[in-house]
Amino acid sequence: MSIENGPNLFNQEEKDPEKIENDSSAEGSYWQMFKDKLSALLAEKKTTSGPSVNISMFFAEHVSAEDIHGLDEQFSSADLFIPEVVDWTPEQLRQFNEVSSGKREPSDIAGDQDGFLGGQLQMIYRSHKPIVFVDLPHGHPLIERYDHLAGQGLPMEKTFSETLQKTRDQIAEFSSINQEREDYILSRVAPAVREVIEKNSVFRDKDQLSVLMLMGAAHSTFYRDVKKAHENTARTFADSFHVFSHYSEGVRRVSLGKEIDDRLAGSIWLGILLERAIDYELAYVTDNSQKKTLLSRKILSEFTLEEIEDVYNGCRTSGKGEYHLIVRNKLKEKNIVIPKTEEEIESYLNSPKNGV
């Protein structure tokens, strides 16, 4: 299918999202139509005004500025930028655009310029490019669901089997919320970009408009939905070979209709504990989220499911404040030493044996 003849979010007239459920021509509910990959927000009437829009989706972890290396190259050729900002307010959007225009310094908003937010603000500073938010705004009901899920904490049921199932249930719920969030984002891209075009005479006169979207790597399956709704969409990962955490792997599997077996559920559960046990000291070793993920996966690969159950049994009879000690003692028992330098991380990752 050619770009010209393929689906195009920007050459179609927008429907009011609040009226879709009452539209007799629509099949199913608002969210179900998105899940079925139908563009329920688009009417059949075509228009030909405005530039052709190209969407570039950049997927990366979102912890440190190092996680978005390579994004600046794509940003330099983009006309407008859509970062992933959930629970945003109009004031935050204004601040981003003031940084872009040079009216505000990046440090006025983010004290840590080496962090993920600081890295973005440094990139957009004085670029004079419009910044657009299409993520869930402050007060959206889905945010409350995210918070409720986060509040459940680490699964710790009466049996290990029940704990694995609770882990699966939490992953499934997170994946469901994520899907609805991505549906919302997709519904907002076209109207938000149209609004910018209508307010900018330079953009209206362009033949092509380049839109750069930054999304967390865990949302990479969202690319399929955007691509189906708008053919002229491309994607890039910050890393040439991206490795997902066990948690993200679980979310991706559920979104693709695949199961989470006991081994993966156990790795997700122990991975949460492992991060709590070693993340603080790793913060002094590297800012590279991919290296941390690779390290975590390597360590977890050295645990059998039975050993993960041993950790569960130890935690089950202890207080929450002792969980990290139980994990660290298990690492010591298995002769796994936490790297203290980036060189030690590389050495451990390349070693077939336990330890650094």
Image: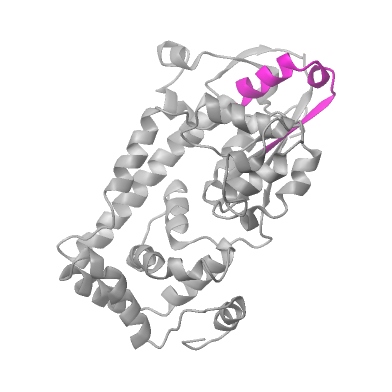
Image quadrant occupied by the N terminus: top right
Residue 171 location in percent, x, y? 36, 51
Residue 159 location in percent, x, y? 17, 65
* Residue 58 in view of the camera: no
User: Is residue 311 depicted above or below 193 in this figure?
Assistant: below
Q: How is the image coloured?
A: one colour
Residue 314 location in percent, x, y? 21, 75
| Magenta-drawn stretch, dominant element (helix, strand or loop) | helix
Between 32 and 66, the one lying in front of the other is 66
Q: Is residue 127 magenta?
A: no
Residue 69 location in percent, x, y? 69, 55
Q: What residue is drawn where x is 57% and y is 81%?
A: 344
Determine the image quadrant of residue 19. Answer: top left
Q: What residue is drawn where x is 53% and y is 31%?
A: 185
Image: magenta residue range: 189-212
User: Is residue 98 depicted above or below 339 in this figure?
Assistant: above
Between 266 and 278, the one lying in front of the other is 278
* Residue 307 in view of the camera: yes
- 310 with respect to 292 (left or right): left
- 16 with respect to 78 (left or right): left
Q: What residue is drawn where x is 47% and y is 13%?
A: 25
Determine the image quadrant of residue 202. Answer: top right
- 74 with respect to 173 (left or right): right
Between 21 and 353, the one lying in front of the other is 353
